[in-house]
Amino acid sequence: MTPPPPLIGAALLFWGWQTGFLLVALPAALLLEMARAVEWRLELSSADFNRVADLCALLIVVSGIYLFSTAGGARGAGGPRAITLLVQWMPLLLFPLIASQRYSAAGRAPLTAFFWALRRQAARDPKARPASTDLGYVYFALCVLSASAANRRTLDFYVGLCALAAWALWPWRSRRFSLLWWAPLLVLAAATGYVGHIALHNLQRAVEQTVFDYMFNTGTGDTDPFRSTTWLGHLGNLKLSERTLLRVEPGADVRVPFLLREASYDVYNAPGWFASGAGFTSVPPEADGETWKFVRGARPGSPVTVAAYLNRGRGVLALPPGAFEIDRLAVVGVHRNRLGAVKVEEGLGLVTYTALFGPRGPLDGPPADTDLSMPPREAPLVRRVAGELALEGKSPEDTVAAVEAYFRRGFRYSTWKGERASAETALEEFLARSRAGHCEYFATATVLLLRAAGVPARYAVGYSVQEWSRLEQRYIVRARHGHSWALAYVNGGWRDVDTTPAVWADTEADQGSLFEPLRDLWSWVVFLFSRWRWGGDDMVGRYAAWLLVPLVLLLIWRLYSRRRVGHGAAVPAPAGGSIARPGQDSEFYLIERRLESEGRGRRPWEPASAWIQRVHATELGPIVELHYRYRFDPAGLDPTTRVALKTSATMWLSEHAQPVVDATR
Amino acid sequence: MTLVPPEVFRKLTRNIETVMRGQSGAIRKLLAAFASGGHVLLEDNPGTGKTTLAKALARSIGARFKRIQFTPDLLPSDILGVSVFDQRDHAFRFHEGPVFTNILLADEINRASPRTQSALLEAMAEGQVSVEGSSHPLADLFFVIATQNPVEFRGTYPLPEAQMDRFAVQCSLGYVVPEEEVAILSAQAQRHPIDTLAPCVTMDDVLAVRRHVFGVRMSDELKRYVVDVVRQTRAANGVQLGASPRASLALMKAAQALALIEGRQFVIPEDVREMAVPVIAHRLIVDPQARFAGVSAVSIVEEILTKVPVPS
């Protein structure tokens, strides 16, 4: 089962072309195919193969760890990507194994290299010869599989795949049928496969669409700048994770706690807030490619440095209110909308950026009609409360102050919601009855009250920076520090109005689990690694390859130091040279060759009588008998019988000049 | 007047087949071993006809036939013979044991102690018996058919490897097809057909056949094939002890005898392949681990036959 000559080299090149590793694939393919040109071979023992296999296993493990820790960042969302990359690297990682096999005298790899159990067995019984296998076709399949992992959705891949498959199948085709059968059938199979995969793809799209329509109302983990599903009306306890999401280092003049906003919304439709007309526009980078300004010219401002993980390189940035410039943000695209959301694209797994902010940020667009709109269901109640507070006619500042005062009196923070009458809305229950809720209740009620008083207001979500980590010596923001508040348009600028009682932070902190310190430590380690990894230059990637050099040198030294390098194929030549083999000119061999060309060849271990039985050529019996006498009777044939053998064989050959397909029927 | 060898075999086969129905393969192997001067070990379940086959062969030749039923308390002297003090001559006289015969049936050989089994060793290998310092030659035609039951583990002593190696061929009979079994029932409804079995060839015929076997020609290429197959057993997976050069020798002789049965004066690869399993398999000691994995000596030899290229 050895692949035909340059098949593996071609498969490697195909792999390199598809995955973009052509520069690596070219020398590797050359090295493998060179084995045919050179005479010398290495005397590799099972132990040597074990070592090479261990080296490959080590490479795979190290690459796996490296890819998993870098490709996806710490959120783990990059797992699939890491696996894909690992599969793509496989031909390279297993190259030492196939190269050892190619240059070994045996030309096969012992199975002990792959199974610990077999190694133990071999250690117990050193005399037993271990089973071996030819890795050629396995490696070929691996190359094709890895090439497919590059997922270049072009016709090139399919055509290449079909060509390679045809090439691999060529030596195994049935000799009984001519090429005119073989080639069209192969083309037909390839075409069927192509059509089938398109149909499968369409089917998958249809299924996905159906499922998506069905499950429309499910929230995603990331902040959606167009919609925010709240927990308003959710019964029971609200519990959020303590996972660390952001690491914040504010400038010296920034007062803690402060808020980092991700997005704001203007339309309430219980239980969600929506952003209307919030299409994104691209922000051009400055000359250095890492600075993004939302206003022209330089302005004084306070800096806040935030480190955040990006899911697949994209996400919405958490920014302080009034941010006007972002520095050191290593992403390809930055987009903003009129509601102050800034999203980035094609970043690394971890971004660290410094946001400059000051009063009157340029990100929030001027108020629109939607910033005063009231949801019809909640409107009567909100108007009534606004009436009770006598907000009519007050200035915006007074209105904000009155609303803040209103929530300070008699409202308390609670993440627990008990039962609620079915008729009333969640907001009614909060304002009129329980007067207890979490930040989303407070923020939503504040926005609606401000609007009822004629002050344009928006609903903002983000994080509250409040927890100092002694471990990391910086502020950390956990998922449970997620917060929502109101934005009020006062005196020509948007202002944060956070009416949630300040006690919320303590309440949330009480929910921390016993394992929090451990989790934090792990999270920090992952962060340090990610920062090191994404910290500008690819240290690991650059030096990992060099780590291989001593390993490979060690391996080569070990091979040479024991004078393992032999010359020529070490397969013991059968000592047949000394044995007389009479009758090699028997015409029976012509018959054998003819039948072999028809795909009815004799197996090496098969005696002639069994063979003619198997291929339904029993009419050859007398010829075999004569041939056997000629070959195996040391007395030999007398001239007359020798002529009889020749004549009968020639007669058979002339009778079977046409394809023998008919003869088998 | 002596018969030509193929005729001898044909007659023997026909005669034995009147008693042993549906066992032509086993008879063929038995005759090949018999003609090549080797001994035969029949291993099969009780009641498959081992003893009948041995008796049928002995009766067909008209040779002396003795049977030893092996039991745990059987002693070597019970087989070889014993020196008895003769009061009249005031000297020891050797009383020949049952081994002094032409055809010896050692029934259930694995039920005797290894000491007794070993007593057969010299007799089988050298054709002579040494008792108390003097050697007593056996008859020219000395042929041992031993039987043993594979299933009977209790109270049995497995044959030592050296003893196994002395047997040229081991074969089993197996159960016959239902039609044949019905025929066996019908044939024995009145009396056992073996009671009426008459000799069909003479001792001289048989000895002539044995001489003929030595004259069967075998090419160097096929000798090499024999050696290749036997050597492979020594390196095969799951084999603790491979076959000895004695196995190569036995395989060559058996192949020669088979060629003679077929009426040929030279050996062809098919002869070697046919006799390979019965000649080699019982000499292999299979690794216990491999045995539990379902590997048997027969399957190992069969696999080797599908690996070693055959001369053609």
Image: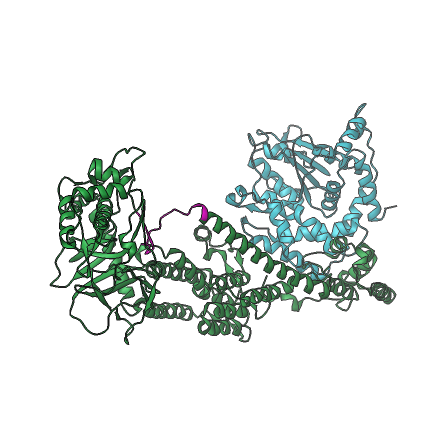
Query: x and y percent of residue A225 in the render?
Result: 32, 56
User: Does the magenta-highlighted stretch encompass residue A219?
Assistant: yes
Quadrant into which the N terminus of chain B falls? top right
Name above or below for residue A516 compared with residue B76. below
Colour of the chain lettered B: cyan
Identify the residue at image location x=75%, y=68%: A584
Q: Is residue B271 left or right of residue B233?
A: right
Query: x and y percent of residue B68 in the render?
Result: 66, 32
Identify the residue at image location x=65%, y=69%: A577
Q: Can you tell which quarter of the image residue A419 is in? A: top left
Query: x and y percent of residue A408 in the render?
Result: 13, 44
User: Does the magenta-highlighted stretch encompass residue A79?
Assistant: no
Q: Is residue A192 left or right of residue B259?
A: left
Q: Is residue A253 left or right of residue A599?
A: left
Q: Is residue B267 visible?
A: no
Identify the residue at image location x=73%, y=64%: A178
Give the camera-side residue of A643 and B65.
A643
Q: Is residue A349 visible?
A: yes
Give the camera-side residue of A265 and B114.
A265
Query: x and y percent of residue A457 in the render?
Result: 23, 53
Name above or below for residue A243 compared with residue B197. below
Q: Which chain is green?
A: A
Region of the chain picked out in magenta, as a range = A213-229
Quadrant into which the C terminus of chain B falls? bottom right
